[in-house]
Image (spheres, rainbow, N blue to C red):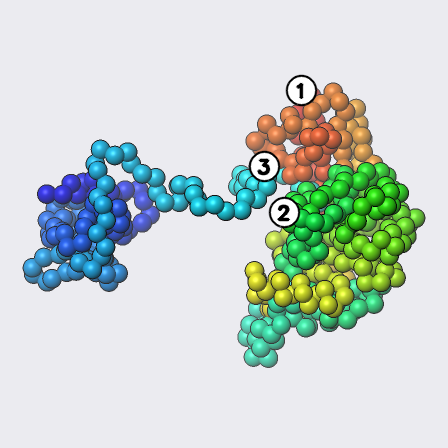
Amino acid sequence: MLPYQHIIIIEKESKVPVYRQIAISIINAIRNGTLKAGTHLLSSRELARMLQVHRKTVVSAYDELQSQEWITVYPRKYVIVAENLPVLKPKKWNEPTEKFSYEQDFKIPFRVVRDVLKTDDSVPEIIVDDGHPDVRLSPINDLLKTYRSFTFRKSAIKKAHIGTTQGTLMLREELTKHLSETRGLNISADNILITHGAQMSIYLSARLLLNEHTNIVVAKPNYPVANKTFQETGAKLIEVNIDDNGIDTDEIEQICKKKKINAVYVVPHHHYPTTVTLSVERRMKLLELSKKFSFAIIEDDYDYDYHYSSSPYLPLASANHNGNVIYIGSFSKILDPALRMGFMVAPKNFIDQCTSFRKIIDVGGDGYMQNALATLIKDGELKRHLKKAKKCYHERRDFLDSLLKNQLSKYITYSLPSGGMAVWITFNKSFSVDKIVSNPFFKIVRLDYELNAFRFGFASMNEEELQSAVNEIEKIVLKS
């Protein structure tokens, strides 16, 4: 008799029903050659007695196996492994137990992504993000109500399923008006591609502009995910210094004189991670260099709407740039990081190609959500939210400033940004930023070990939460 106690494994604590566990065990035994085609199995009564389960459980397992054509049941006669299955070499019982298929490595050659990101599912008590909006202030309820209403209207259902690869026409038209009023962009709906966040826009731009024979200039330090995206195209990354006035355009000019530059990635407003703003002089020079040396500017303007001391500078995309600027923005920084909604603005021929390329990996976005967002813009709700949020974030920035000065001024240096949702803080040499990582109850999302610095996202935290976070940092510093 076959050693069924080794073939069929039942885990009582498992959430998988027992009959399914029996069926899966028999399937695995057939797959690994232990049970060959035509092998007689125990009757349901005998197997139930051996496994100490109810006979109906075994009958259910056999029914499932027969429906999937793994076995053949001859009523009142016998049960056998289906005879049309291929014959496999059986596994010896003294062989070491093999890992499950997905516990093994993929052994066939494949492309390896550099610096694979590790998933961290832990949720510490205190999290300092790198600059997120406060979802508690966002008009998410209004957005979801509109979303739901669209799913009950026949005309809205039709519109939600048309043109989602580039973005629904309703959202692109409303966004055209919004960007004209707020950023001075002279565009049409054809110049806009709606994406799943700014990162998708960066990825699409990079894939169309760059390859192993091209060069792209970025600031040092820079948004690390953007850097990885550019590197994965095979392009050479050329890092340029950044100071209080933004990326060094004189250095870019010298590089352009020596080699061909295909693109420059820049975050003019509140550079990531240092939060500095690109000066007017350097903005003008960068645009002139783009025209002179024919390179694209990828302008990442992820938090344009938050400027506290004065009106924000108009983006590079609003100037006369001969179509060289690819402008990238995001609603995730306005409403909710979980709402993956961004946009790209570029000449129509580039948008057309991005749309076609995007369709290879993603046939389109959520039409209902896009049209709900369009309604939010059209009704003025987004504008009202931004006005309220900007006032609140301004107060939180100033409150954090007072906390840092009162509790941590001996250990840190920083410049208060004129806008944005985060402060870039550098520790003195007496304290190493990596000591923060060892605390399981406290997490800072954006640490820079090389510069001994971190981003303190203040927008998503109220005053009590800001106080708790600063208190925790102070405790860690004092213990070291």
Residue 65 position within the rendered picture, expressed as x and y whole percent measured from the top left = 23, 57
Task: Between residue 371 and residue 229, name the one nearer to us.
Answer: 229
Q: How many marks?
A: 3
- What residue appears at the point 68 percent right and 68 percent down from the top-left corner? 352
Residue of label 3: 125
* Label 2: how many Cα within 10 Å (few below 14, some 14–19, many 20+): some
Q: Is residue 405 above or below residue 117?
A: above
Q: On the picture, is 317 further left or further right than 55?
A: right
* Label 1: how many Cα within 10 Å (few below 14, some 14–19, many 20+): few
Q: Which mark is residue 46?
A: none
Residue of label 2: 232
Q: Identify the mark nearer the N-term, 2 or 3.
A: 3
Identify the element where label 1 is drawn. Answer: loop
Identify the element where label 2 is drawn. Answer: helix
Residue 440 position within the rendered picture, expressed as x and y whole percent measured from the top left = 56, 31
Residue of label 1: 480
Residue 430 can be seen in this image: yes
Looking at the rendering, in which quadrant would you find the N terminus?
Answer: top left
Q: On the picture, is 264 further left or further right than 10?
A: right
* Label 3: how many Cα within 10 Å (few below 14, some 14–19, many 20+): few
Task: Between residue 446 and residue 211, name the one nearer to us.
Answer: 211
Q: On the picture, is 158 further left or further right than 13?
A: right
- What residue appears at the point 23 percent right and 61 percent down from the top-left corner? 69
Residue 21 position within the rendered picture, expressed as x and y whole percent measured from the top left = 27, 49
Residue 188 position within the rendered picture, expressed as x and y whole percent measured from the top left = 77, 71
Residue 458 can be seen in this image: no
Distance CA(mark 2)–CA(mark 3)? 35 Å
Indicate the quadrant where residue 254 lies. top right
